[in-house]
Image (cartoon, rainbow, N blue to C red):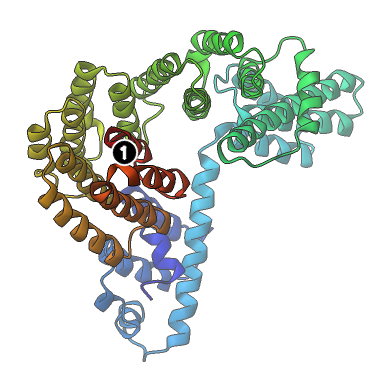
Amino acid sequence: MQDSKLILLLKTFDKEDWRWFRKFLLSPYFNNRKELINLFDYLRSQSPDFPLASLKKEKVFKKVFPKEDFDEKQLSYSMSYLLTQAEQFLMQRKFEESQPRMNNFLLSALVDRNLNKNYKFHFDKFSKQLDNYETQNIDYFLLKYQFTEIAHLQFVNQNLRQDENQLFETYGNLHQFYFLNALKHSCELLTRQKTYGTNYDFQIIDHTVAIIKVQKDIPPIISIYLQIYTLLNEEEMETNFQQLKELLTIFHPILPLAEKRIIYLHAINFCILQATKNKNTRFYLEEMLEFYLFGINNEFLLTKGFLTPWTFKNVIKLGLNLKRFDFTESFIKEYHQKLEQEFQEDALHFNLADLNYRKKNYQEAQIHLLQIEYSDIFYALGAKEMLLRIYYETDEIEALLALIASFSIFLRRNKKIAKNTKESYLHFTTILGQVIRATKDKVPKVIDKINNTQHLYNRAWLLEICNQKK
């Protein structure tokens, strides 16, 4: 029962969900089965952990049907009904999140019932609301298209001659919805193509882009995605990159948070691609850092109000690669508090250790590594790998060999580590051992192995220490 679809769904509920779902079940319009209230109340009392002992079918049945003999089939039906109600509740809540979408459904219902006076009142009211709708994203253009489509149907039903203008507006809104969708998906595909080497046919979108470029009064968000698409096609990159930055500066205030996140991540990914190609690397690293800081400070690169450990680490890596050590230290100490509580201490000490390692303060780095409690497997892996590098740099070969052995055992025995990650670290420990033992004449062979190993952590550092031994 603990792995049932009902329990898995209820585990996602917060206090507000529980409170409103009970009201939902108490409404005769949605539910007329009284036993579902008993089942709901009992399951709510067991949340959020839902202990296995409390979910034994006989015990649950007794709470739901206190005067009846155990009937597994009856309990199964009740659970199924409650699951259906819970899913209906989620649909209702999702529907209520978008007032403009609800407005369109109301207008459609009024058209179906030929309630012209009611329709006219609400149409004028909703039209003004939609004109003032600040979030001009895909949802906006879809809502606008649906709104004008409903208006078109009203004109058709009433045989009104003004329909031509309304139909043309419907046509225009449909195109804007398509243009934005096509550009967003194409930008994502282009990024994947450049990152993973896959190939896609962009012939249709290229024709679409040509049409968009000759349009008048292109909405800001479509202009931005058009600029990203052009940029990813590497057309006059420096000019187009500056134009994208100008567009973002101008239209940042009117972009919705979700769109800002996607757009700035595209800009960041473009900078990553350019930096890895050694095209003005420092410039693109600095631009990437600015994009990250702007997104963090304006909170659209946060997730549920928190900075993720990965975004936090990416900013620190940029600071370290740019050798902006004072900035990096300040960022670590200030912004680790924006992480979720469980990650804060480990993130603080791991990244201060990394900073001190880069500054060759190896003893200070080790002090911070000893304070890591390994709230996340990646901190455990990263800390051990960093300690290996410290032992190598400080020529503590005995400690280094012992750690290589224990780390290799840890990697092989831990089943929670993803296959590619495990291989990368195992290859790292194996090759590091070979570097230590390699004589000068054997170094080229080790370098070949480093270059030809597919999954390998910290390849650049291994190559660096090999070159030092030549």
Q: Which residue, as the protein is rendered here, is positioned at the far front? A: 441
> Left or right of 230: which side holds 444?
left
Res 46 quadrant in image:
bottom left
- Picture layout, residue 415 above or below residue 176: below
The total of numbered circles placed on residues is 1
- Could you tell me which residue is drawn at 14 percent across and 45 percent down? 372
Q: Is residue 120 visible?
A: yes
Q: What element carries label 1?
A: helix
> Left or right of 411: which side holds 455?
right
In which quadrant will I find the N terminus?
bottom left
- Picture layout, residue 34 above or below residue 470: below
Q: Which residue, as the protein is rendered here, is positioned at the far bottom? A: 69
Q: Position of residue 85 (x, y in %)?
A: 50, 62
Q: Position of residue 424 (x, y in %)?
A: 37, 51
Q: Is residue 308 visible?
A: no
Q: Position of residue 8 (x, y in %)?
A: 40, 64
In the image, 365 versus 92, the foreground residue is: 365
Q: How crowded is mark 1: few (under 14 residues within 10 Å), some or many (20 or more)?
A: many
Q: Which amino acid does label 1 sit on?
A: Cys
The residue to which callout 1 is attached is 466
In the image, 456 versus 32, the foreground residue is: 456
> Left or right of 284: which side holds 238?
right
In the image, 144 versus 411, the foreground residue is: 411
> Left or right of 444: which side holds 118?
right
Res 326 quadrant in image:
top left
